[in-house]
Amino acid sequence: MGTETELKLSLAASDIPALLKHPLLAAVPKRQKLHNTYFDTPDLALTKERVAVRERRILRKTLLTVKTAHPSEGGISQRSEWEAPTTPGVFDFPTLVDNAQLADKLSKIADQLVPVFTTDFNRRIWTLEFRRATIEIALDQGLISVTRDGICREQPICELELELKSGAPGTLFALARMLSRHVRLHPADESKAARGYALFLDKTHIPVKAAPLRISSNDTTTSVFLNIARSCITQLQANEQGIFTPQNDEYIHQARVALRRLRTALRLFSAALPDGFAERWSQAWRDIAQELGDARNWDVFCNEQMPRLYEDLAEHPDLIALRNFAQTRRLATHEAAKKIMQSRQYSLNILSFCEALFGLKDDQTLIRSYATKALKRRHKRFLCGARKAHTLNAEQRHEVRIDLKKLRYTLDFFESLYPKKRVHAFSRSLTETQELLGHMNDLATAELLMAERRLATEDTPAAWAKGRMSAYLELLPAALRPVIQQAVPWEK
């Protein structure tokens, strides 16, 4: 058995000639033509267990391969792998797999295995010595094919695999960054097998929310930061493809949430990180967050504010003109968001950030004390603004809302350190308060968006927004009271 440690990168077929001109790929590559057939039971029992069984044909030789997936670490996939020559159609798992339990499980279902999908591709292989690591580079071009119910579906393969043979995992990102000097190489976590199963099942993407974090008092501040940062990058990338679909509002929202959580974590852990680390990476993600934020603001305006305007103003001439303006701006901001998510700079950000994460040294400081101090600091700052929020202007109230969001994100990060009932009670009060502050912020944002029209005089929709804000201001003290009075979970 071996352990496969690799980083997958997608690229455009049109960029391959430029990639091949890179000095690191100057050597003549080894070439292979690979035909792979993936097997499973009719009810897909293997993929449910995160196990892949594959027959690989290279010229006249056939290899039987079994892989079991481990959780991805920082964008790098790791799998246990067994591979040996075989006779086509013969699944001799006891001889191949030295894990007795797995071999027995596979042997019991061997007679049920049927072909599910195939991958056919041409591979070019280079082996490099890079920063005291040995890395195999494989450039694959071909097709994933599925035939089901008499219908054949295909998906192209165009990817670069960097497999670590020896050395530190972080060097995979460093090499990817260097190879992307003139082309866009984008981290792609899905294996060919995962893509094949998705094609077989005709899976559709759905928006992905932040995954719950599980930390313990024995974790260090560095390990917790790494856990949070990698979770944010995972959520961000899980929503990428959805941003390029027609119904992309929620994907944009969730990608934006991922970046807001990440930038919150960078500021939260700045004292535990190397000098300049938090500021550098918060700035690096700022432009991408801004483009997603602009698109999200117009989505909220068109989906939530415009229907309310129609309820109150019906077909007012000012409203018709506003609707046309809003639709145009919404389309423009969506195109800007797509453009930046397709940019080489975005991909480089992910590669460089993940490389930087692997370079962090653990400070051995336990998280509990750090978390409690951070929560107290966030809570104190929020209370300072909340107690006088009804006297503040729109910009200052927005800062109170941002402080509340930061407090909520911080509690989300650390909630498993504190009593569950107390956390839930406090979170509930935060949510109720945040809802009203969110409505107020949406109105304040709506005023800013409508101001982009640069009208000579205030029109009816702008006056409507000011009127609704006055009504919300009257509700604000009562809405803030529960969270101000609620007992905090980090104090006994």
Image (tube, rainbow, N blue to C red):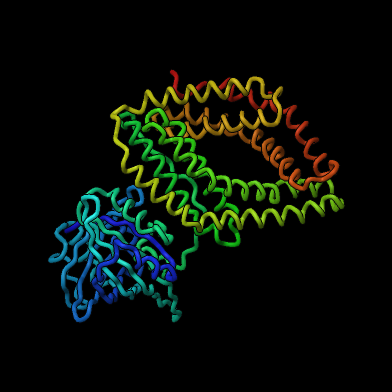
Q: 114 and 466: which one is in front?
A: 466
Return the x and y of residue 260 as percentages of the image width and height: 52, 41
Left or right: 171, with 416 as reference point: left
Q: 263 and 12: which one is in front?
A: 12
The quarter in which the N terminus is drawn is bottom left
Return the x and y of residue 253 as percentages of the image width and height: 57, 48
Left or right: 432, with 8 as reference point: right
Q: In which quarter of the image is residue 394?
A: top right
Left or right: 294, with 203 as reference point: right
Q: 98 and 255: which one is in front?
A: 255
Return the x and y of residue 127 as percentages of the image width and height: 23, 62
Return the x and y of residue 232 as percentages of the image width and height: 44, 44
438 versus 109 height, above or below: above
Furthest-left residue in view? 95
192 versus 90 height, above or below: above
Q: Quadrant of residue 146?
A: bottom left
The quarter in which the C terminus is drawn is top left
Name the residue at 55% across, 57% down.
Answer: 339
67 versus 76 height, above or below: below
